[in-house]
Image: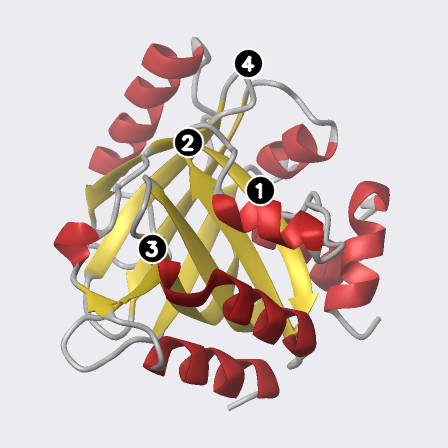
Amino acid sequence: MSDADVLMAGVAAGLPPVGLDDVPELMSRMDHKYVVGVTTMARLAAELGGRFSVLRIGTLRQFRYTSTYFDTPDLLTFRQHRQERRRRFKVRTRTYLDGGGRWLELKLNGTRGSTDKHRIPYDAAPACELTAEAMRFVGETLVNELGMAAPETLGPVLSTDYRRVTLIDRAGKARLTCDTGLFCHDGERGVPARRDRVLLESKSADGRAVVDRVLRGLGVRPVSVSKYCVAVAVLRGVPANRWQPVMRGYFRL
């Protein structure tokens, strides 16, 4: 385990546990992302004090995830994100390796900066394939939610593996996901993120979670980062100027 993995295991062990039923879904939400070192993460955990709980499933508080992302041959969804299109989407399968099954997820960015996630169970299908049912789900959701047609061709591009600890604000409808040990791979090449970094995602209904306030007090500002987009950039070497500052701090480039 990495330095960040060990730190987050310790943070999780010191918090009261809650089950999945107590985790706010927040399928429509405002997100703020941060990349922090282990020292800052330890300070953040101390500042949050007893306000947060940690997700526990069975005996586990830290979970392994793998996500496979789908795109067009010319990387339409990557280009939409790089160009900051107000209406854009990402398609992925997400497998919860420590329980929780597999889901097909469609993440949408709307005109007001919110993120909406739609998903269907996907246990019966391979993680690296989109079935006819999956394509119907993607097409109908894009038409209904964003008024756009789905691409004719979507295929697997790359996968990301990581560990996650999920913290839940007991005083409000907000949560913080803490990802460590990110590894990006596409079947030909693999690139690990720095082992002393934690990718945080503050998720709340209004974008004003207590975590965001505490991080500002620690001198940490939100960053623009997408696991899929930075993975495309580091694996394929495509231009990604807007993410270069994050990539230099998150990967050893």
Task: Look at the numbered disc 3 and give the secondary structure of its residue.
Answer: strand
Q: Position of residue 100 (x, y in %)?
A: 19, 63
Q: Is residue 22 left or right of residue 61?
A: left
Asked whether disc 2 touches disc 1, contact meaning CB atoms under 8 Å apart, the reply is: no
Residue 50 vertical position relative to residue 14 in the rendered view, above or below: above
Q: Which residue is mark 3?
A: 168
Residue 26 vertical position relative to residue 97 in the rendered view, above or below: above
Badge 2 amino acid: Arg
Hey, which quadrant is residue 2 in on the image?
A: bottom right
Instruction: Give the residue furthest to the top.
Output: 147
Task: State the residue at coordinates (61%, 71%).
Answer: 43
**Numbered circle sitting on residue 29:** 2
Badge 1 amino acid: His
Q: Nearer the viewer, mark 1 or mark 3?
A: 3
Task: State the residue at coordinates (81%, 45%).
Answer: 240
Q: Which residue is mark 1?
A: 32
Mark 1 or mark 4: name the one nearer the start of the chain.
1
Task: Look at the numbered disc 4 and give the secondary structure of its residue.
Answer: loop
Hey, which quadrant is residue 20 in on the image?
A: bottom left
Q: Nearer the viewer, mark 3 or mark 2?
A: 3
Instruction: Give the residue furthest to the bottom.
Output: 1
Q: Nearer the viewer, mark 1 or mark 4?
A: 1
- Observer-nearest residue: 71 or 121? 121
Badge 3 amino acid: Ile
Q: Position of residue 167 (x, y in %)?
A: 37, 60
- Observer-nearest residue: 87 or 126? 87
Q: Nearer the viewer, mark 3 or mark 4?
A: 3
